[in-house]
Image (tube, grey):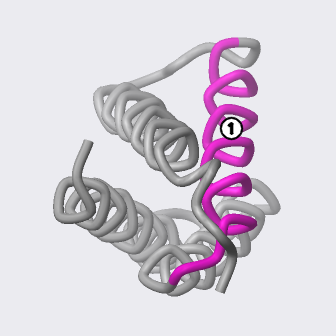
Amino acid sequence: MGNRMVFTLRYIAATLVVASGVAMLASLWSGELIPYTVLTAIVGGIYIILGIGLYGQSRFSLFVGAVMPLTLAWYQINQGIADAAGELQFAVNLCIAALSLTVLWQVRKRPST
């Protein structure tokens, strides 16, 4: 896989993470202010920071970009997905993890900068 393709996949993953984070933060204004909503907004803020890291060159952000969405997807499976928004979040989390793992695999032998 070429450098351009790796860059494109990383850019797509970063954009999905930032968009997902913004949607999670927006849940503060669209629903009731309960502890679950506040926790979702905190995770959304972390997602935005992660997305900024994915726009860079760090391998650590790729690792976190795979682990964190998979953890949230696992949590969603255990708690049950209640609505269409939850299903979309689940699908986006799996896409982010797959893209991050693909890019991490492609850059594994490149020298660090």
Specify whether 34 is left or right of 101: right
Point out the stretch of residues depicted in magenta. Answer: 57-77
Locate the N terminus by quadrant: top left
What residue did someone put label 1 on? 72
When asked about the image quadrant of residue 64, the answer is bottom right
When asked about the image quadrant of residue 34, the answer is bottom right
Could you tell me residue 75's position as x and y percent?
Answer: 74, 27
Whether 54 is drawn above or below 37: the answer is below
Identity of the amino acid at label 1? Leu
Whether 36 is drawn above or below 27: the answer is above
When asked about the image quadrant of residue 22, the answer is bottom left
Task: In this rendered view, identify the residue nearer to me: 99 or 30.
Answer: 99
Could you tell me residue 30's position as x and y percent?
Answer: 39, 69
Q: Secondary structure at mark 1?
A: helix
Residue at left offset 57%, top offset 64%: 32
- Residue, far right: 35
Q: Which SS type dominates the magenta stretch?
A: helix
Locate the C terminus by quadrant: bottom right
Specify whether 35 is left or right of 105: right
